[in-house]
Amino acid sequence: MRGLKGVVAYDTYYGNTKQVAEALAEQIRAEGHEVELRNVRDRSTPPPIGDFMFVGSPVRFKKVTRATKRFVKRLDLAAWKGKPVAIFTTVGEMPGPDVPEKKRRSAERWILPGALEFRDLVRARGLNAVEEVLRVGVKDLKGPLVPGGIEQTRAFAADFLHKHLR
């Protein structure tokens, strides 16, 4: 389906989540759709209107940012009812196989649930959050994104568009 409008809304601390949002927007344009890129902290713009949305945030201590949650809570439910919404997050890089099992389990407990919990919050709000979530790893605290993160993002966007927009 051609000519739809997407919204990519994001929050960012160090610019990593913004990079992911920009890559999503580029892929949406490459697929022939219009896109609005929006920082959730910008309240000066009117409420977003579109046919589908990506909402993203960094995850720290299992949580997305307050600004991202506030953005979702303020969305016009009537305007977004039934339209597909995808969740994306940037997260600390998961420890590799050389890290002891106990440390890996601890990292999983603090890093992985944030995106799923946010997806569930979006669903509880009455929005059509799709099952798949995008988690892009960030090296260290401030970045950069892990190698292959942008390619992973573009593939996620293409898959979402082909799967959920018919």
Image (cartoon, rainbow, N blue to C red):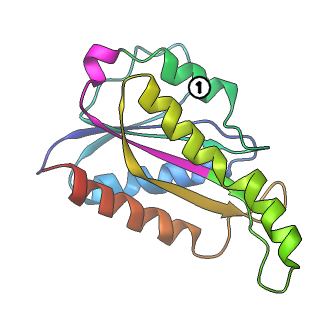
**Which residue shows up at 40% across the image and 16% down it?**
47
For residue 49, side relative to residue 95 (left or right): left
Q: Image point 60% across, 61% down: which residue? A: 136
Q: Is residue 87 visible?
A: yes
User: Exactly how many numbered labels are in the figure?
Assistant: 1
The residue tagged 1 is 69
| Depth order, front residue of 108/164 | 108
Q: Can residue 18 be seen in this view?
A: no
The residues colored magenta run: 77-89
> Does residue 14 sit above or below 150 in this rendering?
above
Q: Does the magenta stretch include residue 84?
A: yes
Instruction: Report the residue at 37% width, 23% height from top.
Output: 126
- Judged left or right of residue 10, residue 154 is left
Q: Of helix, strand and loop, which one carries label 1?
A: helix
Side (left or right) of 16 relative to 48: right
Quick check: 144 left or right of 20? right
**Amino acid beneath label 1:** Lys
